[in-house]
């Protein structure tokens, strides 16, 4: 289980970044995409900068990644 705790956050981060880049290619409306994904764009670096001081649980990492993917999908198709 400790290995999953160290491997899963970078994998989830990569998944979210790939989804963010793909969703930014020809979204339905560019302003709506920006407004929907700004929280992912701002929140990702904040999590990275505070990771050592405030490490997150595996469950929380998965839930945050899921929420980010929902925001990204909504930004692309809204």
Image (cartoon, rainbow, N blue to C red):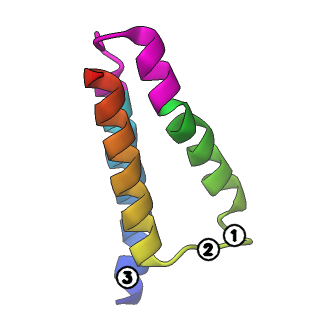
Residue 35 is marked as none
Secondary structure of residue under mark 3: helix
- Give the CA distance from mark 2 to mark 1: 6 Å
Q: Is residue 30 magenta?
A: yes
The picture places residue 67, in percent across and down from the top left corner, at 39, 52
Residue at the spot 30% in from the left edge and 22% down from the top edge: 78
Secondary structure of residue under mark 1: loop
Residue at the spot 62% in from the left edge and 38% down from the top edge: 42
The part of the chain drawn in magenta is: 21-36
**Residue situated in front as seen by the camera: 22 or 3:** 22
Residue carrying label 2: 55
Residue 3 is marked as 3
Q: Are marks 2 and 1 in contact (CB under 8 Å)?
A: yes
At label 1, counting other C-alpha atoms closer than 10 Å, the crowd grade (few under 14, some 14-19, many 20 or more) is few
Residue 52 is marked as 1
The picture places residue 36, in percent across and down from the top left corner, at 46, 30
Q: Are marks 1 and 3 in contact (CB under 8 Å)?
A: no
- Give the CA distance from mark 1 to mark 3: 17 Å
Q: Are marks 2 and 3 in contact (CB under 8 Å)?
A: no
The picture places residue 17, in percent across and down from the top left corner, at 40, 39
**Residue situated in front as seen by the camera: 52 or 71:** 71
Horizontal placement of 7 versus 35: left or right?
left
Q: Residue furthest front?
A: 78
- Give the CA distance from mark 2 to mark 3: 15 Å
């Amino acid at each position: 289980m400790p290995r999953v705790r160290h491997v899963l956050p970078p994998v989830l981060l990569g998944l979210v970044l790939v989804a963010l880049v793909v969703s930014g290619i020809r979204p339905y409306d560019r302003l709506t995409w920006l407004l929907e994904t700004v929280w992912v764009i701002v929140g990702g670096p904040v999590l990275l900068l505070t990771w050592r001081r405030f490490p997150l649980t595996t469950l929380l990492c998965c839930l945050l990644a899921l929420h980010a993917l929902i925001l990204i999908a909504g930004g692309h198709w809204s």
